[in-house]
Image (tube, rainbow, N blue to C red):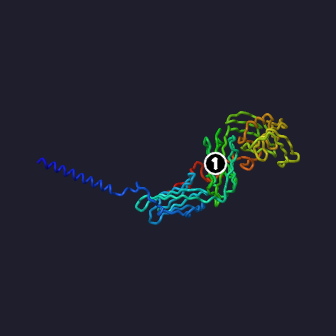
Amino acid sequence: MNQTPRLSTVLRCTLLALTLGAVVTACGDSAPAPLTSKPFDAAGQVSFNTPRGAVKVNPDKPLEVTVKEGEGRITDVAVIDEQGHHLGGELNADGSLWRSGGSLSAGARYRARVATENKDGAPGLRTLTFETSPAKRLLTVEFAPANGETYGVGQPIIAELSRPVPDKAGRAAVERGLKVDVKPGAEGAWHWLNDDVLHYRPKEYWPVQSKISVTSNLQGVKISNQLYGGPSEPLTFNVGDRMEAVTDASSHIMTVFRNGEEINNIPITTGKPGFATRNGIKVVLGKEYFVRMRGSSVGIGGSEAYDLPVYYATRVTWSGEYVHAAPWSIGSHGYANVSHGCTGMSTGNAAWFYETFRQGDLVHVVNSIGDEMDPFGNGYGDWNLSWEEWREGSALTQGVRDGSHITDSARLRPQI
């Protein structure tokens, strides 16, 4: 009677062992899950529309990746150049075709990595390295102001293109490639003056004591049909204090502010009737210790003709409007407007202004009977446009509400 329990116990343990063994054997014989498998070589499954051999790819044509019918589907595509730039594209619904949405760069070397899965769900992988043909027509950019200098808070960035870009798509490509870095940060935008010149300014003036860096990332980038970006020199400059002179043509007083604090009041004279000084915000363009001013150079003759030696001349328009010493009209300073459009003051005050203000500082004329300052063409009148008007001159922000997020679909990763 004592042997029966022992036998039943042995049988139960044996059956349990056999059962567990069957489970272990079944698991050991099953195929590994696809996600843990090493990807198979999908070279026979995936094809590119690139030429065979060492022939370089035409960057004007989109890149296409296809999978053979019935051979599975594409799950992901990554195409990256040697600078780490991704080529965006779209994958169709069944995963049989991926087509680039962005343009290939000219004269670049790419590596494409295509992930797939076959009809059984096993992962595959194919890689391809290829080069694109160099561009036949290049667009380069020259930036201003001068590199490494310090400017006022009103100084715009100027980008002069080597070739005109008349179409909006090309302009958008240019703007995406021109990078402005401001430390500390400041919102800003480009504005096209014409087909080959654009300016950049922040929403407000540049932050005081900031550093501005401008670079072009256009090299190899397609701008328009057979036109690609070329190499361009970067620009870095500093911004000083916020210096602003408010010229009141009615009270005949110039009030000078440094970083919002009033630091000087100067008696002045501005343009008389028929030669009234332009209203608006002007930016200092440069300084000349001595200028010979002749009325004939700006079409003024007859009884209004003049020929004067002028000292401490700070230029605010290309057509010849200055803030300068005018000792010949000292009796009118603070009382009457008697000039031909310039802002005159005593020699001592003009010397102080000349030494205190730098290129990019602000001169704001108010209460004149003259015309408004042109935004462009006669100096840097950029600040006479509202922020909304300024944004309308950009190919990227035109018609886009301020604060809206702008998405460039060509930069998105493939969607599945």
| Residue appearing at x 44%, y 66% in the figure | 70
| Residue appearing at x 72%, y 49% in the figure | 376
Task: Point out residue 221 in the picture as x, y percentages from the top left corner.
Answer: 61, 55
Kindly identify the amino acid type of the residue bearing the numbered disc 1.
Thr
Question: Which quarter of the figure has residue 102?
Answer: bottom right
Task: Point out residue 178 in the picture as x, y percentages from the top left corner.
Answer: 63, 50
Give 411 or 367, whichever is nearer the viewer: 411
Give 194 or 273, whichever is nearer the viewer: 194
- Compared with 179, 268 (above or below) is above
**Residue at the left extreme?**
1
Task: Tally the marks.
Answer: 1
SS assignment at label 1: strand
Task: Point out residue 218 in the picture as x, y percentages from the top left corner.
Answer: 63, 53
**Residue at the bottom extreme?**
69
| Residue appearing at x 86%, y 43% in the figure | 307
Disc 1: which residue:
215
- Compared with 220, 360 (above or below) is above
Instruction: Tell me if mark 1 has few (under 14), some (14-19) or many (20+) residues whose alpha carbon lies within 10 angstroms of its own.
Output: some
